[in-house]
Image: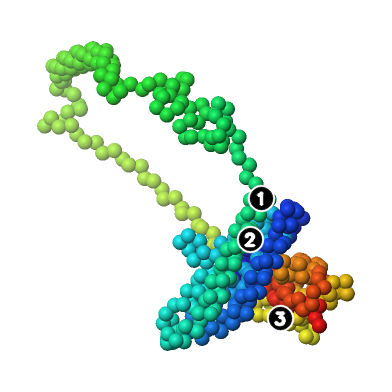
Amino acid sequence: MDAVGQAVESWYTTAGEAWSADLEKGGTPLAEQAWLFIEKAALTLDGLPAVLKRIGAPEEALQVLELIGSLLLALPDQMASGLESSVARVDWMFSRLLNAPGQPGLIEQTIEFLDEPGASGETNEAQADYSAEIEVLRGLHRDLVTVQQVWDELIEATFPVVPMPPLAGEKKGSAGRTSPGALPGKPASGAPAPLPEGLKIAPSASSRGTESASRLRAAGKPYRRLAMLMALLLLALAFMGVFLAQARGGSTVNPDSAALSANGHTPVVATPTPTTKAQPTPTTPAPTPTPKPPTPTPKPPTPTPKPPPLPDGSICPDNAAFCVSTLQLQVPCEGQGSVTFQLFGVKTSQQNWQAISMPSGSLVTLSPTHGSLKVGQAMTIQVQANTRRQNRSGVIMIFGPFGTSPITLDVLVCAD
């Protein structure tokens, strides 16, 4: 059900949506046919929740069944809307309801829950009683497949696919397709492609190695000559150092020199070390205490405003975003008047709502069909019949934001 709510939340009609007269003209009778198929299986679908609980089916089975009901109620209205954006919505609904390659649809999943042996602990005779429900579900699946095929033909006729024109130089009859080997500007398969302008072929690894070695040998010749010159220079400096050392060693020492003592040792003269006065250590000022901020005075709690009371007799379904004045409407025949009901907001923030009628909007007309409400606000919705046929029945569904449950109103037109 959350998936349906998420999808329907983005289906609010806006002025920018494209509308197609051909799509509405072809989709309206198809939507009426789909509604007849749904009505044929409606009683069985209404009784399936009790059956699934009786056989001990998991909670997932009840959620699947609820999702089927929501999709079936929204499907005819979307088919007859004439909006181009509804095409994707209808296709999505068919993809969820019907089987696809490798993935069973929601109807088939419900059949599997009913047909699973031993799921409820009942005898085979008791399980055989559900063959009638299974047959109704299979019939509904076949009918919807028929509707889907006609719907696909309608979409192909309303929005034809325009083939791409053939490229220059191609033969007619190729349907505008281009083979991967014959793209424009590229040679055909097997023909060598010329190199782009400005590119050169890189040399091979062996040729690059030979060229590098030749360059190294040529570059090494001046370095060898420089090394020989440096060696000769160092050798000359070494000879000069030896000669100077010998010349210094031959000098005479004066015996009368006062610099020498009797035993030939040089006296050690003590050098007075200057005394450094201790510098006074600067006194670090005591830190100034940081004043504490004043203690804030607690404010009294703000009283929560109470929402205005709802009118007496209003109905608020579980998990719904709104309340209504009634869940049943009796609408006079076309041209004999109209009836109204009220929608009340119960949330503190603005909540969008969307109202649709089944089947396909051909039974009654709603005004307005969408808007937004918050707590304390109300909207009066007018309902007018579009038929003079006696005892026609349908429903009005009001959808709220994602995650909330829709509200369903039963409608009886031209009652005896």
**Distance in Å between CA atoms under marks 3 and 1:** 45 Å
Which of the image's four quarters has the C terminus?
A: bottom right
What residue did someone put label 1 on?
Answer: 157
The reply to whether callout 1 and callout 2 are in contact (CB within 8 Å) is no
Q: Residue 173, located in which quarter of the rendered image? A: top right
Q: Pick whichever of labels 3 and 1 is earlier in the sequence.
A: 1
Disc nearest the viewer among 2 and 3: 2
Position in image of residue 203 (x %, y %): 33, 21
Does 125 sit above or below residue 324? below
Which of the image's four quarters has the N terminus?
A: bottom right
Q: Amino acid at mark 1?
A: Ala
Residue located at (60% from left, 34% from top): 165
Closer to the camera in the image, 375 or 339: 339
Residue located at (70% from left, 66% from top): 32
Q: Residue 163, located in which quarter of the rendered image? A: top right
Position in image of residue 69 (x %, y %): 62, 73
Closer to the camera in the image, 133 or 7: 133
Does 205 sit above or below residue 126? above
Label 2 SS: helix
What residue did someone put label 3 on?
Answer: 316
Residue located at (67% from left, 58% from top): 86
Q: Amino acid at mark 2?
A: Val
Residue 358 as seen in the image, left or right of residue 237: right
**Distance in Å between CA atoms under marks 1 and 2:** 16 Å
What residue did someone put label 2 on?
Answer: 90
Position in image of residue 379 (x %, y %): 81, 72
Q: Residue 286, located in which quarter of the rendered image? A: bottom right
Disc nearest the viewer among 3 and 1: 1
Position in image of residue 332 (x %, y %): 84, 77
